[in-house]
Image (cartoon, grey):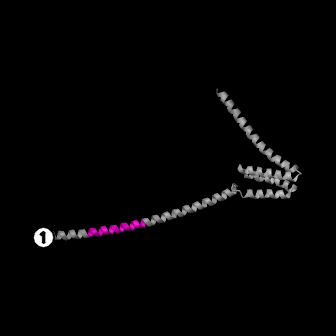
Amino acid sequence: MKKILIAAAVIAAVSMASCGGKESAAVKDNESAIKAKIENCTNPDSLSLYVDQAKAYAQKLVQEGKLDEAKKYLDQITPVVQDKAPALAGILETVKTTLDKVPGSAEAAADSAGTKAGAAVDSLKSAGSQAVDAAKQKGSEVVESAKEKGAEVVDAAKDKAADAADKAGDAIKHALGK
């Protein structure tokens, strides 16, 4: 039974690996096919259509998160289009410029993340500083309040002690008969 399961697992792994290779080969074939069509094209209308296909393919790569591959692909095709139809090459250059501004690029993402992290740290520092200042102020108020209450209690105790001493003195005088 174990041998059958192991054999099934091996077959599944081999078929998965072969599917991935076919997909990668299909992608390369698509790149090559569009490039070959552009290289062999003599009709300006057809060339325009092939350039649109190249743009669409580059957009597909960008949507899949393969920004660098899209840039490389356009870099390969642009010289060929430049030779055949300079006006269409301008379109590809515009697409490449747009790709440089895509926020999915690693540098743009790192810059954005760094800026956001810096702002968050500054915000935390400010909030922490405000909390410390507020705690110091509140602590100072509590200490002052405690001092005032303590002074009032001491004064009240002194007054009661003085009253008690006077009453005791009066009681002693009265007891001695004076």
x and y, in percent, of residue 105 in the image: 70, 55
Residue 70 placement, left or right of 155? right
Residue plotted at (37% across, 67% down): 145
Quarter assignment of residue 86: bottom right
The main secondary structure of the magenta stretch is helix
Q: Could you say which is closer to the camera, residue 174 or residue 134?
A: 134
x and y percent of residue 98 in the render? 74, 58
Q: Residue at x 57, y 63 (%)?
A: 122
Q: Nearer the viewer, residue 82 or 177?
A: 82
Q: Which residue is outermost to the bottom? A: 178
**Location of the N terminus (image quadrant):** top right
Magenta span contains residue 132 = no
List x then y, in percent, for residue 125: 54, 62
Tell me the amino acid under the disc marked 1. His
Q: Which residue has dot 1 on it? A: 174
Q: Which element is circle 1 on?
A: helix
Q: Quadrant of residue 81?
A: bottom right
Q: Who's the residue at 87% across and 53% down the image?
A: 44
The residue depicted at 71 percent of the width and 32 percent of the height is: 11
Question: Where does the image place residue 82, in percent across and percent down from the top left?
Answer: 85, 56
User: What is the residue that sits farthest to the left in this orientation?
Assistant: 177
Query: In the picture, residue 172 is in which quadrant?
Result: bottom left
Number of other residues with Cα within 10 Å of mark 1, as a class: few under 14, some 14 to 19, many 20 or more: few
In the image, residue 33 above or below residue 141: above
User: Extreme right residue here?
Assistant: 42
Looking at the image, residue 134 lies above or below residue 79: below
For the record, the magenta segment spans 139-158
Total marks in image: 1
